[in-house]
Image (cartoon, grey):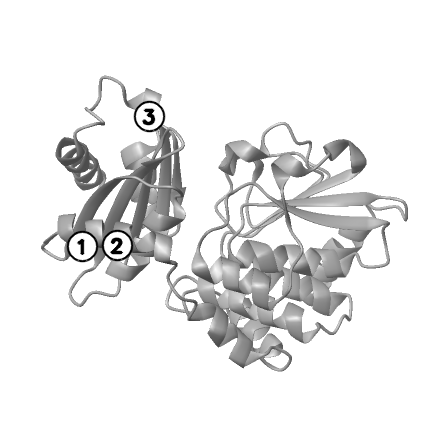
């Protein structure tokens, strides 16, 4: 593996000239943020400039805490003048994963999610068997003989920690080795502070609504909470319900930005959540994920004639029915 990573590193670095300006685009979560940090460090002093831009609204408490505590500099993509850049990279995602990535001629894709399409780009490194893209970036840094700073090591450490759910989800031995390596350099106290970030006050009313409406039956928790300001509300509530005793499946849904958002969590022992969501909703919008966690985003206009979106009870039952049909 070491020689393979070294070969990939040479190919990656060979894409750049000293005057290049790189834009790294992410759908920000801990693994994506840390991976972008890793790529930026890899190219430090090798190119003219590197900027990290995110396509999503960042509102999850752990993401906000990570950005604050690690003192990261990131920019919303809509505020970036793309004409100022000569190279474009995407990490922890693929061009087809988010509509915000559209219209960008990516040169580099580094990811650990299932391959969506053959991109044919100058540099593609996609390893679906890996638990985190942060593991891949750690391997690149080691191949380049770069000792990570405490800030970078903490970010990558936390990226692996979250995407493998403390190694309760899919992982390979390389994830474990990267985690062990980063442990030497990471600020574990800071990582704990990020992990234990408080729920924002703005989220509380949605938690209250979810607690009032949730239906739990035969180890499955379903709740549709209606309009939310950001999909991260659904993600946060799904992670909360996943901690319930005797609950093995969680489905939390809501609407945001003209889309139906469906977040699925399970205990990792039963059927594949990503495949289930893709089967249930893939013909209507973007849907997929991992064995224990998955997500669907469906334009509401695609649901016309399928369900009455304004009736929360009917909408919630329709979502649950589709999940059951896919299982």
Q: Does 34 sit above or below residue 264?
A: below
In the drawing, what numbered circle is on residue 300?
Answer: 3
In the drawing, what numbered circle is on residue 211?
Answer: 1
Pointer 2 residue: 207
Q: Is residue 295 left or right of residue 143?
A: left
Q: Residue 239: x and y, percent?
A: 32, 59
Q: Nearer the viewer, residue 36 or 266?
A: 36
Q: Nearer the viewer, residue 155 or 280?
A: 155
Q: Residue 30: x and y, percent?
A: 52, 59
| N-terminal label among 3 and 1 | 1
Q: What's the residue at 62%, 67% (across, down)?
A: 70
Q: Is residue 111 left or right of residue 50?
A: left
Q: Does 277 sit above or below residue 219?
A: above
2 vs 3, front mark? 2
Q: What's the residue at 64%, 64% (across, down)?
A: 71
Q: Secondary structure at mark 2?
A: helix
3 vs 1, front mark? 1
Q: Secondary structure at mark 1?
A: helix
Q: Does 46 sit above or below residue 106?
A: below
Q: Residue furthest right?
A: 18
Q: Residue 117: x and y, percent?
A: 54, 34
Separation of residues labelled 2 and 3 (CA atoms): 23 Å
């Amino acid at each position: 593996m070491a020689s393979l990573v070294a070969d990939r590193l040479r190919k990656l670095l060979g894409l750049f000239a000293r005057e290049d300006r790189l834009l790294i685009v992410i759908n920000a979560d801990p693994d994506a943020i840390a991976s972008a940090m890793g790529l930026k460090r890899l190219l430090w002093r090798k190119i003219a400039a590197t900027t990290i831009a995110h396509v999503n609204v960042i509102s999850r408490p752990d993401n906000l805490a990570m950005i604050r505590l690690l003192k990261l500099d990131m920019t919303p993509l809509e505020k970036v003048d793309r004409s100022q850049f000569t190279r474009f990279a995407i990490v922890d995602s693929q061009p087809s994963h988010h509509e915000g990535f559209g219209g960008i001629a990516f040169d580099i894709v580094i990811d650990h999610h299932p391959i969506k399409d053959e991109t044919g780009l100058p540099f593609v490194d996609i390893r679906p068997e890996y638990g985190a893209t942060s593991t891949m970036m750690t391997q690149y840094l080691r191949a380049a003989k770069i000792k990570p700073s405490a800030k970078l090591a903490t970010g990558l450490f936390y990226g692996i920690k979250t995407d493998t759910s403390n190694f309760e989800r899919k992982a390979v031995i390389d994830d474990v080795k990267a985690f062990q390596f980063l442990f030497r350099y990471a600020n574990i106290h800071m990582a704990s502070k990020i992990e234990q970030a408080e729920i924002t006050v703005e989220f509380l009313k949605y938690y209250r609504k979810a607690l009032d409406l949730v239906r739990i039956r035969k180890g499955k928790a379903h709740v549709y909470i209606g309009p939310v300001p950001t999909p991260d509300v659904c993600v946060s509530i799904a992670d909360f319900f996943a901690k319930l005793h005797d609950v093995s499946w969680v489905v939390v849904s809501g609407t945001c930005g003209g889309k139906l958002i469906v977040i699925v969590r399970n205990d990792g022992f039963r059927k594949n959540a990503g495949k289930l969501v893709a089967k249930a909703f893939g013909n209507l919008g973007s849907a997929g994920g991992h064995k224990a966690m998955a997500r669907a985003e469906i334009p509401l206009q695609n649901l016309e004639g399928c369900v009455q979106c304004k009736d929360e009870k009917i909408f919630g039952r329709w979502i649950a029915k589709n999940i059951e049909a896919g299982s």
